[in-house]
Image: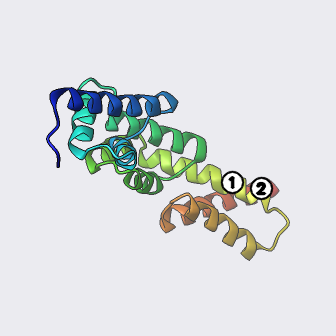
Amino acid sequence: MPWLTPDKHQEDVEAAREIVLRRLDRSAAPRAALAQLLARKGTDPRVAEEVLDRLEAAGVVDDAAYAATLARTRFAEKGAARRAIAEELRRKGLGERAISGALAQVSGDDEVGAALALARKRLRATRGLDPVVRRRRALAALGRKGYSQAVALGAFERALAEEAGEDR
């Protein structure tokens, strides 16, 4: 690699910093995504690391906060299970420490409650269909959201029992 003069190095750092800050103006992003962005832009890996380290030290790049926000959003708005949220966070390049911290916000009881709400919704939408079809559709919807088979089955059976109680 050619020797960088101090001025050239500073120019490269400023250019990389601008790229990252422009990206962060649109929305938060994990460090791994920002590193990929800089790599795509042809930024020297050492310059990229220096810029990201500085922004992380300043609190501008915060993987733990990003993971916590994403976990809250995915759970509250989409009803995603902890397993699905963890997989998404891993795909985004977050570390296990940030992931476990984010998932601590969602308790097992919260997850069971969200699964039950989704099962009730699915059963309402499939009223009048064959019971086998209703079961398959409800369990498939819960599975797509990342719920374990045990949680999905428990939520489905409870929602079905509640529905049977209403029909009396």
Residue at left offset 17%, top offset 49%: 1
Is 133 left, or right, of 33 in this rendering? right
Instruction: Count residues near mark 1 (Cα–Cα under 10 Å), then give few for <14, some for 14-19, many for 20+.
Output: many
- Quarter holding residue 55: top left
Along the viewing direction, whichever of 64 and 154 lies nearer the viewer? 64
Which residue is labeled 1 in the image?
A: 120
**Tag 1 near tag 2, CB within 8 Å:** yes
Which residue is labeled 2 in the image?
A: 124
Is 101 left, or right, of 150 in this rendering? left
Q: Is residue 5 above or below residue 101?
A: above
Residue at left offset 67%, top offset 64%: 138
Q: Is residue 61 visible?
A: no
Secondary structure under tag 1 reads helix
State the residue lying farthest toward the top: 58
Calculate the distance from the C-alpha at mark 1 to the C-alpha at mark 2: 6 Å
Percent position (x, y) of residue 35?
33, 44
- Quarter holding residue 103: top left
